[in-house]
Image: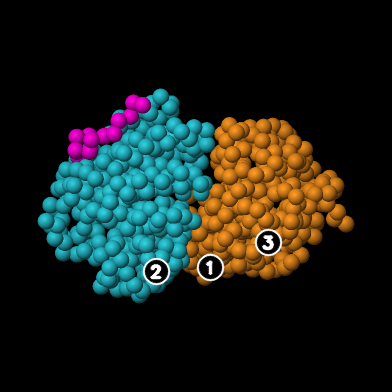
Chain colours: A cyan, B orange
Amino acid sequence: MNQLANDRFLRALRREAVDRTPVWIMRQAGRYLPEYRATRQRAGDFLTLCKTPDLACEVTLQPLDRFPLDAAILFSDILTIPDAMGLGLTLDEGVGPRFTRPIHEVTQIAQLGVPDPERDLRYVMDAVRLIKRELHGRVPLIGFAGSPWTLATYMIEGGGGDRDFKRAKQWVYAQPVELHRLLGIVTSAVIEYLRAQRAAGVDALMIFDTWGGALAAGAYREFSLDYMARIIEALGDAVPTILFTKGGGAWLEHIAATGCSAVGCDWTVDLGEARRRIGDRCAVQGNLDPAVLRAPIPAIEREVAATLAAYGKGPGHVFNLGHGITPDIDPTHVAALVAAVQRGI
Amino acid sequence: MNQLANDRFLRALRREAVDRTPVWIMRQAGRYLPEYRATRQRAGDFLTLCKTPDLACEVTLQPLDRFPLDAAILFSDILTIPDAMGLGLTLDEGVGPRFTRPIHEVTQIAQLGVPDPERDLRYVMDAVRLIKRELHGRVPLIGFAGSPWTLATYMIEGGGGDRDFKRAKQWVYAQPVELHRLLGIVTSAVIEYLRAQRAAGVDALMIFDTWGGALAAGAYREFSLDYMARIIEALGDAVPTILFTKGGGAWLEHIAATGCSAVGCDWTVDLGEARRRIGDRCAVQGNLDPAVLRAPIPAIEREVAATLAAYGKGPGHVFNLGHGITPDIDPTHVAALVAAVQRGI
């Protein structure tokens, strides 16, 4: 059974009353922690760290031993799915993710299969089971996947970080039928992957739509949001879901309409306005600018209070950054952030 | 006197009836045009091109000779102001703008003066006067400046393109008083500069807030929007103004509340939603994704029609891209875009 000592995070996702606003931090298991860097060094490289359940479990738990966070998040990468599809992922520091066999021809789509999570992504499911066991019900565990559009962007661009997404947008405007075919396969893969994570024990699921914000409004709905809505529908009510489109501040109502449990907001969104726009439909997660963590501690405390005040009273807020924490942050500043959220307004 | 043969653009900014939606293109005088590349080669480098009124006039007029555009925009750069303040601008292709003397110490602020436009930025005013003469009233001429926040970002970062704006955000959160002092001086400089452009003959003014979208909602209002509002107020009703914050889709109501004539929208905004959110307060400019121009012409025509349809009937729309045109675009695709706007829905 799944008895949790601290279910504040899950209660907030259901918009139920909580004693205080729950908090976790995107990329909380990461390079800003010296213990993470030590484990990673033992692993040799990032991908080995992802693919070794013992080590993935170890780094998942590290931030919980330092800070009184209200949720753990599976240590993994959104690109495990295209890797399992055979695109050949490499993740070198400084270079970013690259695929050795990106999708450059339409004919390649027919060769893509939907991975069987327990066979092709077994290391992820084993990590989930191990982490759940090691957590002993301290806090809930969040599983995740990239959005179909975000995964397709990486698969088409192949890495290298073109900020304009020239190749992927060429598919949007010049071969939309083929892009829909690709997105359909990726969506099936994401659904299977998230269902398997759920079966393996995660308590909530988050979809990271890192590059949805690069799309025009109409293209976003057609090529990103609609596929995320299909995933939410396929998952049903069995597990709470968080949908996060970076740069999606103009589309919050549409994101909420997918039926997700919570809308993730980046820092460009005023949480009070987000709440008014979304209404009672779902919870809100976010949204301190990660840059605040470089400021002196009194400034961090002031900005945390301002973020809590922007959301206001009442249930439905999960405190987080508006994007992942960066490697240059001093862990004592993270401790100050978490303490400030715990104190409240 | 200022008799214009085509005042469609100015009428749309005033939300008056027009026979068809006016169109111009951000960075319409640019590297995608072979005639521009030829003039630039003669100039030697970009900054010389900006600083030589004859050549700036020549490239300003080039796109008008190719396409039936409804406005010209002064060929210049937003960084002329910090250059005139003595920061030492260099603009090398591939590297982007850099300052040889960026603002890294608070003590440097006291040394900054407000440039006298007719003395320190004479080449810009001379270019405006020359372009107005050479236009013979064909279409209105747009003058422009960078927003104080955007200029301050470049002045503090010094160039190099840190996507996270670490240094500038450090000022936001760790030394806001000093940042306000810097922004105050830059705002005075922008006001003087835009007033001088107006006196030299421009028919409308645009403020480019290229990096406002990097800020958190509250910080945007405090460090970018408030200063743009001061500029709009200082300019009064003498000249129509367009305010464009890239990535500002979540803040359109606030931008409209400055009293600007038009809100520039990037492509993440649905123009119908923008219109509903802004109401009758001001016109809307935008917002085709520049990536569309890489698609085949039928796709360009479809997306232009969708953009016009999103805004809908009635006055107050100036068609444009959602950001500047990129150097790799085929000019025949631009011709197709302009023709599609002229045909209408």
Crowdedness near tag 3: few (<14), some (14–19) or many (≥20) residues, C-alpha within 10 Å: many
Q: Tell me the tag on residue B261.
A: 3
Q: Where does residue A323 sit, x and y in percent of width and height?
A: 38, 54
Output the chain of dot 1.
B
Whether residue A80 is visible here, answered yes or no, is yes
Output the chain of dot 3.
B
Q: Where does residue A270 sit, x and y in percent of width and height?
A: 45, 65
Which amino acid, by three-letter code, is at mark 1?
Glu
Which amino acid, by three-letter code, is at mark 2?
Tyr
In the figure, is residue B54 to the left or right of B234?
right
Secondary structure under tag 2 reads helix
Crowdedness near tag 2: few (<14), some (14–19) or many (≥20) residues, C-alpha within 10 Å: many
Q: Determine which quarter of the picture holds residue A269.
A: bottom left
Residue A112 is covered by the magenta coloring: yes
* Marks 2 and 1 in Cβ contact (< 8 Å): no
Looking at the rendered image, the quarter that the N terminus of chain A falls into is: bottom left
**What residue lies at 55% left-to-right and 48% top-to-bottom?**
B267
Mark 2 → mark 1, Cα distance in angstroms = 19 Å
Residue that mark 1 sits on: B222
In the figure, is residue B335 to the left or right of A16?
right
Q: Where does residue A45 sit, x and y in percent of width and height?
A: 27, 39
Magenta part of the chain = A110-123
Mark 3 → mark 1, Cα distance in angstroms = 21 Å
Callouts 3 and 2 in the same chain: no
* Marks 3 and 1 in Cβ contact (< 8 Å): no
Residue that mark 2 sits on: A311
**What residue lies at 69% left-to-right and 46% top-to-bottom?**
B23
Q: Where does residue B334 sit, x and y in percent of width and height?
A: 66, 37
Callouts 3 and 1 in the same chain: yes
In the figure, is residue A1 to the left or right of B293?
left
Q: Nearer the viewer, mark 3 or mark 1?
A: 3
